[in-house]
Image (cartoon, rainbow, N blue to C red):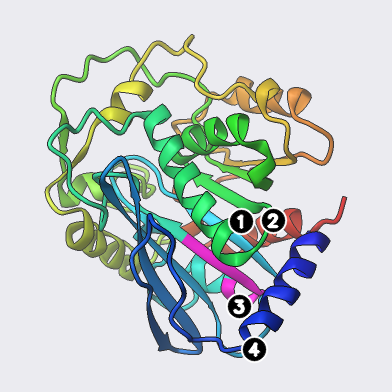
Amino acid sequence: MKNRRIARFFAAMLSCGLMMTTLSVSATADETEADLKDGFVRESLEVEREDISLHVDVTYSADSEVEDEILLVHGLTYSSHEFDVDYEDYSLVEYLAGQGYKVWRMDIAGYGQSEELEDGFLPDSAYASEDIHAVVTEILDREKIDSIDVLGWSWGTVTSSLFAEKYPDQVDKLVLYAPIMSGLGDIEVTDAFNHNSWVHAASDFQMNADGTDYDYSITDPNVVEIFCSNCWKYDKDHSPNGGRRDLLTDPENILIDPSKITVPTLVICGSADPYMNMPLVEQSIDSLPEGSELIIIEGAAHAMMMEIPYYRVFREDVLSFLEDAA
């Protein structure tokens, strides 16, 4: 972390401190577009891999010095807007940016604002991990740093852990939020694309006791509305199914092998998350390297970063792990 700050200092000196100057681009990225809103600078760019354009954006505070950088990796079906629910203080992006981070997001090929694909099975977990590598390589080159923190959610824990296994030198710390440790059930996936719907988009929000409606003591109805609206806006009526085919396998199929992860890792999930293989989650800490942590938040579920009782606890735990110098 200290080395990254030193590198950033010299990079800033070379650029004469011009915060919103258009960035020079590599052979794989288009020109950056910048915007200033609510005290945050937001920039977007495109990174190309295998002739497919990947959407990338970054958010950071206009009023305070950038101290560190993190990439957020989305899960299955819905893209990186998940981390930026624009309601009250729910945006994880703005929270981390307010804590001195440059917060990067990306859309895997075929997702969100990245280029659409003809073959929805193409971006499976291994393919997506190489998308992450391409984007991280671009970020490190632009920012003149050696490594970056990475947070993956849901399927993003599978893809980001594969990336961290193969390219550990590019990762400072890894956060596995709601990790899919093993297969979720042996179900054949025959359609190359998922048929998205409003109901499906809201399926990770906790329901009330009789299952007839969402539990609005857990999730604010405005958050549900905004999240689902963004799903329809950015992800539309279909999303690639390569990752779904990876996840819907026998529960004996290990998707994340913690013994292969060599960077400090936070495993964080909720006790009410139906996708968790809790024995494997609890055992993961035994195989992870020094400096790793395991946190299970009682009562929280898959979308706890948007849940009223848990979202602040979740992100404070994440920040504490990232800032720990150990």
Point out the frontmost of discs 2 and 3. Answer: 3
Q: Are marks 4 and 2 in contact (CB under 8 Å)?
A: no
3D distance between C-alphas at marks 4 and 2: 35 Å
The answer to whether 110 appears left or right of 166 in the picture is left
**Where is 242 relative to 204, above or below?**
above
State if disc 1 and disc 2 touch (CB < 8 Å).
yes
Residue 61 image point, x, y percent: 57, 82
- N-term-proximal mark, 2 vs 3: 3
Instruction: Give the number of the mark in front: 4 or 3.
Output: 4
Local secondary structure at mark 1? helix
Residue at x-position 84% and y-position 35%: 290
* Mark 2 and mark 3 residues within 8 Å of each other at the beta carbon: no
Q: Which mark, by number, is residue 314?
A: 1
Inspect the image, locate mark 3, and give the three-letter code of the amino acid beneath it: Gly
User: For residue 98, which numbered disc appears in the image?
Assistant: 3
Q: Amino acid at mark 4?
A: Cys
| Left-right relation of 47 to 256 | left
